[in-house]
Image: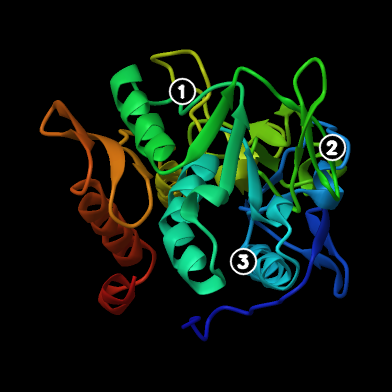
Amino acid sequence: MISPKVHFIEDDVVKVNGKDNTVSTKKNGDLSYDYLFNALGFEPETFGTPGADEFGLQISDIDNSAADYQKIQTTLDEYDEFKDPKLLNIVVVGGGFTGIELLGDLVHMVPKWAKKYGFKKEDFKITCIAPGFLPMFNKKLGDYAQHFLEKKGVKFVMGDTVSKITADGAYYGKDDKFIPSHLVFWTAGVKGSDVIPASQYPDEHRNRVAVNTDMSLNDFPNQYLIGDVSAVKDDKTGRMFPTTGQISIYEADVAVNDFLNKLNGKSAVKFDYKSMGTVCSLGPYSGIAEIYMFGMTFKLKGCIVPIFKNMIFKKNGLELGNIRTMLES
């Protein structure tokens, strides 16, 4: 429920004009601002791979995720009619969170599809092509996840990259090996919104802008950038923090509190992020996790992980909304 104090405009942002303090939109023209909170999110990063934008199935919002699911259903219906085994091939490009969690959900659905469409489970081929496997986890947990998925029928092609995607499948490796498939999922990376380069922000890399520790910009101190469009340096490692939902919520808190401090003549808010850990689902009933609590690290695997992930959803629901949002999440 949006507060009556909020004027909500549904439109596409084209460009942020920092010098003029305006935001250019498709339908409503230029909108002026005194302060701007930019949380435009991410877009798939295809690295110029031919066919990835046109033929790759991408998971970036609810609409295209629903379209992806419908494409799977349509392809299975075609198999039911023509019995072409190539229609039972799925390729997943990328070995990060999105790709591996997608694999977990796919292998969970295979037995149900096999029963409905009358094929053997082993006839449904799922191939994952990636240069690496969940590099953010330690090897023991990563091995557990990979072996779990392999036992469910996933074939991993590690250390290779996809060179081209067509309507008929994916090419990969130095010698352009080919996997026939009408269902090639592209989960190999994300970048910030394309509005960022269009707006000519300074210190921008892969559509992410380096920000101060209060989430503001030196050149435009009345702007706050949050989430996938921002890059915050971790002083302990010297590297930028990875963009996750967890840190995005924290960044929003920092930005809002700093904004309130500015209005009240107080000092800037200190960025002091502490990750609660990392969780990767392997379908609805398993997963791997590193949880940081009480000054210790807990490495978890198996059926206990979905319980922790549900707790995270509840916590995020409470932070982003209220008790009702938490209970419904």
Residue kind at label 2, given as amino acid type: Gln
Residue at screen point 43% across, 61% down: 111
* Disc 2 element: loop
Can residue 239 be seen here? The reply is yes
Could you tell me how far apart the alpha carbons at marks 2 and 3 are, in whole angstroms? 36 Å
| Quadrant of residue 277 within the rendered picture | top left
Q: Is residue 281 left or right of residue 52?
A: left
Q: Is residue 280 left or right of residue 97?
A: left
Residue at screen point 57% across, 78% down: 6
Q: Is residue 207 left or right of residue 90?
A: right
Q: Earlier in the sequence, mark 1 or mark 2?
A: 1
Q: Earlier in the sequence, mark 1 or mark 3?
A: 3
Image vertical order of residue 18 relative to residue 71, above or below? above
Residue at screen point 51% across, 73% down: 116
Q: Residue furthest left?
A: 294
- Residue at mark 2: 200
Numbered mark located on residue 69 in the image? 3
Residue kind at label 1, given as amino acid type: Pro
* Disc 3 element: helix
Residue at screen point 65% across, 67% down: 76
Residue 311 percent across, percent down from the top left: 23, 57
Q: Nearer the viewer, residue 318 or 145?
A: 145
